Amino acid sequence: MNNSHHRTCGCIIQDQILMEMVEGYRERRIEVEQACRIIESDLGGTARGAFVTVTIPVVVHVVYNAAVENISDEQIASQIRILNEDFSATNPDISDVPNFFKSLIGKSSIQFKLAKRAPDGSSTNGITRTQTTRSSFPPDEFLATGFIEPVKFDSSGGKDAWPSDKYLNMWVCNLRGGLLGYAQFPGGPAETDGVVMDYQYFGDIGTATPPFDKGRTATHEVGHYLNLRHIWGDDQNSADPCSGSDLVNDTPNQEYPSGGIPTHPRRSCGSPDMFMNYMDYTDDAGMFMFSKGQVVRMQAALEGPRASLTTSDGLTAPCG
Ligand code: ARG
Ligand code: ZN
Ligand code: CA
């Protein structure tokens, strides 16, 4: 991956395409934002501590062509463990957050588990495996082909989503276009909802490849799935790269996406940058925190547009 300021991010490309192609998507995104704002202001008050642990049922759809892409159950388990550490600020490298930002560390009550009950009520380990004749999957052809994501449909060499109101769908495949992964924000079409990850940037064992071999791509993409935006405000192509916002109050305004692992303090837009935040483009070993404001925003998404995940039966093992 290069670290150019103009590098495209799949998550944002997908958002832009949905804006153009899906009737009502723009309006739904605005509604989602308004609803989350109201919940956020409640959660931002003293009620914050009352947020109980929410465990999101996850299904991982491994869609592979070459055998190497058929990653192991253990590699998948490593990714789930990393998500749970990162979202609860119990990741071993949380201690590397500079003193300057320590008071802003966000600890969420959001956890993840592989599903135990499949949509048809049968028991499952939360992993599906599909062999495909496609050697790689596009996000880069979104624009050329219209809105088609073959990895998300049986009919196009991928795997259909499990009902996205009950499960967080994670597709793992060979992604082309130099993309590590991408996500759909809340408010998009149900059939394509979830995150897509390249098999080389999932978990921290097996095929995990440096410098993105610590499972942080999934942390970043699930952040988008729970309504977080990039910390630099996605304004890298605008005339004033300090004009954008991630709609979070406690993340400093930042000029551009970061790359590699910068040295703190690095300033832009008048303040030190929080380039160690999961919603930047820093290497995996250099990103290790969400902010408190980002956690409130994600929790608002789970009380609002993603609330149905919290009452899912996907984690209840079927009896008998
Ligand atoms: N969608 C982004 C990309 O493909 C993910 C970046 C995640 N960064 C990381 N250090 N894992 O570039
Ligand atoms: Zn992103
Ligand atoms: Ca910016």
Image (cartoon, rainbow, N blue to C red):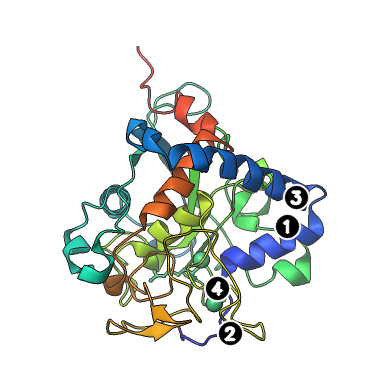
Pointer 2 or 4: first along the chain: 2
Foreground label between 3 and 4: 3
Q: CA distance from mark 3 to mark 4?
A: 26 Å
Residue, disc 3: 25
Q: Quadrant of residue 305?
A: top right
Query: Ligand 1 within 8 A of label 4's CB?
Result: no
Pointer 1 or 4: first along the chain: 1
SS label for mark 1: helix
Q: Which mark is residue 6?
A: 2
Label 2 sits on what residue type?
A: His
Label 3 sits on what residue type?
A: Tyr
Foreground label between 2 and 4: 2
Whether 45 is drawn above or below 91: the answer is: above
Residue, disc 1: 18
SS label for mark 2: loop
On-image quarter of the C terminus: top left
Kindly check if marks 1 and 3 are in contact, taking CB atoms under 8 A apart as contact: yes
Q: CA distance from mark 2 to mark 3?
A: 25 Å
Q: CA distance from mark 1 to mark 4?
A: 20 Å
Q: CA distance from mark 1 to mark 3?
A: 7 Å
Q: CA distance from mark 2 to mark 4?
A: 18 Å
Residue, disc 4: 176
